Image (cartoon, helix red, strand yellow):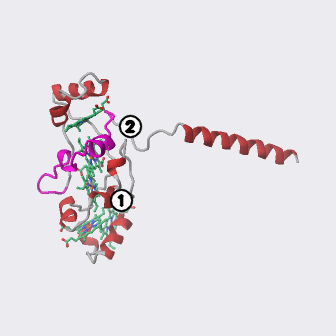
Amino acid sequence: MKTFLQLGCVFAACLIAVVAQTEQQPLPGPQQPIAFSHKLHAGTQNLKCATCHKNPDPGDSMGLATAGLCMQCHSDVKPDSPEIQKLAAYAKDNREIKWRRVYQIPSYVFFSHRSHLTAGATCVTCHGEVKEMAQMYKAKEINMASCMNCHQANKASTDCLFCHEKMN
Ligand code: HEC
Ligand code: HEC
Ligand code: HEC
Ligand code: HEC
Ligand code: HEC
């Protein structure tokens, strides 16, 4: 009986802990050097992804906006905000903003954004509903199995050397 009661208390404590956690849930995903919101920029402001992710040649990577590009708007928009002042300092010193990466695959894997966009995939397919994200987080798992599943479904090659260099 005693142990049952003790268990009950432990359970109640856990329950309180869980409730407390859901009440002040932190945003998912890594804290970024500047609190950038896709929900605000790509959602509310309806900016195109390509405004900031230009997919430079040869098209493998999407690329990230520089502080200078952000400042094209933010020299006028909210210049007094502390976050924008951080941004302005990066732009002034021409310093690279060290955004924490959310999606990254190892360098021994071939991947090209452009080939996939040409083949009809969209950002949502691999990155989820970015327009609704107040903070970027990993909405979809990207690993060998998820690549393979889509290749199988779309009759794209699943040959090892399609995605990997010849190992040794
Ligand atoms: C096309 C114009 C435009 C561009 C480009 C742009 N922003 Fe914004 N940004 C806005 C607008 C509009 C708001 C909303 C301002 C408001 O709340 O009134 C905003 C809000 C913000 C805020 C919130 C500021 C606050 O304190 O409320 C941050 C931080 C921010 N932007 C960062 C960035 C960063 C970083 C970039 C570049 C990657 C960027 N912005 C590019 C227009 C832009
Ligand atoms: C105003 C500029 C701006 C626009 C518009 C924008 N992004 Fe971004 N994006 C950023 C910045 C800055 C980061 C890095 C900070 C972060 O992760 O929030 C980023 C990061 C990302 C990442 C994570 C990359 C990684 O591996 O860390 C993805 C995925 C992404 N954006 C997709 C999109 C999609 C899809 C759209 C259009 C629906 C879009 N972005 C529109 C500025 C922008
Ligand atoms: C077929 C899946 C797929 C699609 C479709 C896709 N991405 Fe990605 N994305 C990835 C993978 C995988 C990575 C990690 C790449 C790496 O580490 O080299 C990535 C990385 C990124 C990054 C990080 C920086 C960079 O330069 O690569 C950004 C930004 C990004 N994606 C934005 C987008 C946007 C915007 C779209 C739509 C126009 C999009 N992605 C469509 C799979 C995808
Ligand atoms: C949304 C479905 C989908 C996903 C997810 C996907 N692929 Fe693909 N991939 C395709 C299709 C379809 C093609 C064939 C395009 C063509 O025929 O040109 C392709 C082509 C490729 C190519 C050849 C492209 C070229 O430039 O020759 C490589 C390499 C590749 N994918 C690697 C990957 C890797 C690595 C991942 C996981 C990180 C991945 N793919 C995820 C659908 C997908
Ligand atoms: C469609 C693209 C694709 C194909 C085809 C593919 N791989 Fe991969 N592979 C990946 C990606 C992406 C990763 C990285 C996974 C990660 O980071 O979680 C990977 C990782 C690996 C790793 C490292 C695993 C680890 O846990 O460290 C090995 C080994 C590997 N692949 C072997 C193979 C072999 C053998 C084949 C052929 C049967 C193959 N791959 C076919 C995309 C592919």
Q: Which residue is mark 2?
A: 31
Q: Secondary structure at mark 2?
A: loop
Q: Quadrant of residue 64?
A: top left
Q: Which mark is residue 42?
A: none
At x 38% / y 37%, what residue is drawn?
A: 31
Q: Give left or right: position of 34 versus 12.
A: left
Q: Amino acid at mark 2?
A: Gln
Check the picture and name the quadrant holding the C terminus: bottom left
The percent position of residue 70, horizontal first and vertical second, equals 19, 35
- Whether residue 139 is situated above or below residue 158 in the rendered picture: above
**Disc 1 beta carbon < 8 A from ligand 3?**
yes
Q: Quadrant of residue 32?
A: top left
Q: Amino acid at mark 1?
A: Ile
Q: Which residues are magenta?
A: 33-60
Q: Which residue is mark 1?
A: 142
At x 25% / y 26%, what residue is drawn?
A: 78
Identity of the residue furthest to the bottom in this view? 155
Q: Give left or right: position of 48 versus 40.
A: left
Which class describes the residues within 10 Å of circle 2: few (<14), some (14-19), or many (20+)?
some
The percent position of residue 150, horizontal first and vertical second, equals 33, 70
Q: Secondary structure at mark 1?
A: loop
- Whether residue 150 is situated above or below residue 37 in the rendered picture: below
